[in-house]
Image: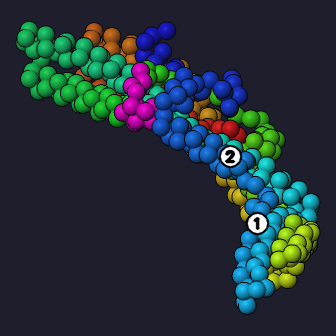
Amino acid sequence: MKLYKTIILLFLVCLSVEICAQGRYGWVIDSLEKNSPGFKALKARNDAEKAEARATTFLDNPEVAFGYYWGSPSDIGKRWDLSVTQSFEMPSVYVHKNRIRKLTTEYSDNDYARQRIELLTEAMEACADMVYYNAYVTLYAHCVKNARRVAELYERKMEAGECGILEYNRVAMDLASIENKLHSAEAERDMMLDNLKMLNGGKQLAFAQDKYERVNLPSDFDQWFEKASSKNPELKLLKQQQTISEEQAKLAKSEWLPKMAVGYASENVVGETFRGVTVQATLPLWHQKGTIKKAQAQERYAQAEYENIYARQYNHLKGLYRKAQTLSHNLQNLQETFTRFNSEELLLKAFEAGEITLENYLQQVEFYHDSEIEILEIAHELEHTVLALEKFEN
């Protein structure tokens, strides 16, 4: 196949593998997870939050009291008291607190997963842009090669007196214009490389990919969404928040039971000593007022927020899914049409043989270039749309 057609075929996003291909920019993602300060900070934060949750204790510290008293008049002697008490709550309170601790640890893991996906998506979007600019560079490098070929032809013609300076200037300006576009594409590509380098902890990445991996949209959106929503970190966070709120409501009800304290007490006076066990009960008449209502309100809010986000995500992703379908259909149609009717190589040969004029050649070449750029633009937009869908299900 001719070089030019080969270049363009690389831009086609064929329909052959699942949306969430695990190898999508995999080597870049592996490098980022090893080197990115953002990933390291997220992991350290997650470890700290889980360590904090595990370090939580449910029993209050024991209390020790000592009193020393001297009598008046002095002949009644001295007295000293000692008491050690330990307070505790009803067993149901500890059961709910322990569940909340476990749920909080799981919540931290899912929050880490959510923020990790945010960083991964940023990196994959940068990769998608890198492919886009690499493809642009490949395309314009080929255009420069052909334009230089025409310019050299006209330079020889002008030296032989077969054309005028105006015609030569025209092809020279066309070459300069295409070279400028190539330099601009290279500059944009280098900026994206610098961005990837920053995300990679300052380590350079050699990113030469100039085609997009093939994708296949799910045949049934509703089935895909139902499956993907069960893995979506944001929805899992909201669901866990709802579960935590339910446990907090149960905990608030349990805390209405009296809080107990048992201990040992000793009282010593001249010639007499009293020792024994003490029992105390704290009645939560004032401190817990409104706590149950607050916990129940938070539970209702968590449920309503989950339903709201679920519906919004469904509508948003349904729109992205339809957009991806349209882009994929348009891309395939354009690619097939371009492949069928592209005859740039024949056009160049006809021009070199003097069968068509310079003006006609440049107009036809510009038309082909515009078609190729349109194909690339659609492929680029489709890639970002697919990444948005992947972000939800990862």
Looking at the picture, does residue 240 appear above or below residue 301? above
Q: How many marks?
A: 2
Residue 71 included in the magenta stretch of the image:
no
Residue 9 seen from this side: yes
Q: Quadrant of residue 356?
A: top left
| Residue 257: % across, % down | 91, 72
Element carrying mark 2:
helix
Few, some or many residues within 10 Å of mark 2 (<14, 14–19, 20+) = some
Q: Which residues are magenta?
A: 194-206
Looking at the picture, does residue 105 appear above or below residue 36? below
Tell me if 202 is positioned left or right of 357 in this view. right
Few, some or many residues within 10 Å of mark 1 (<14, 14–19, 20+) = few
Residue matched to label 2: 50
Residue 256 seen from this side: no
Residue at the farthest bottom position: 73
Numbered tag placed on residue 161 in the rendering? none
Which one is in front, 140 or 105? 105
| Residue 258: % across, % down | 90, 73
| Residue 306: % across, % down | 76, 59
Instruction: Give the residue type that dot 1 points to.
Output: Glu
Instruction: Give the residue type that dot 2 points to.
Output: Lys
Residue matched to label 1: 63
Q: Residue at x 92, y 69 (%)?
A: 276
| Residue 35: % across, % down | 48, 30
Tell me if 255 is positioned left or right of 75 in this view. right
Q: Residue at x 25, y 13 (%)?
A: 149
Residue 202 included in the magenta stretch of the image:
yes
Element carrying mark 1:
strand
Q: Residue at x 76, y 66 (%)?
A: 63
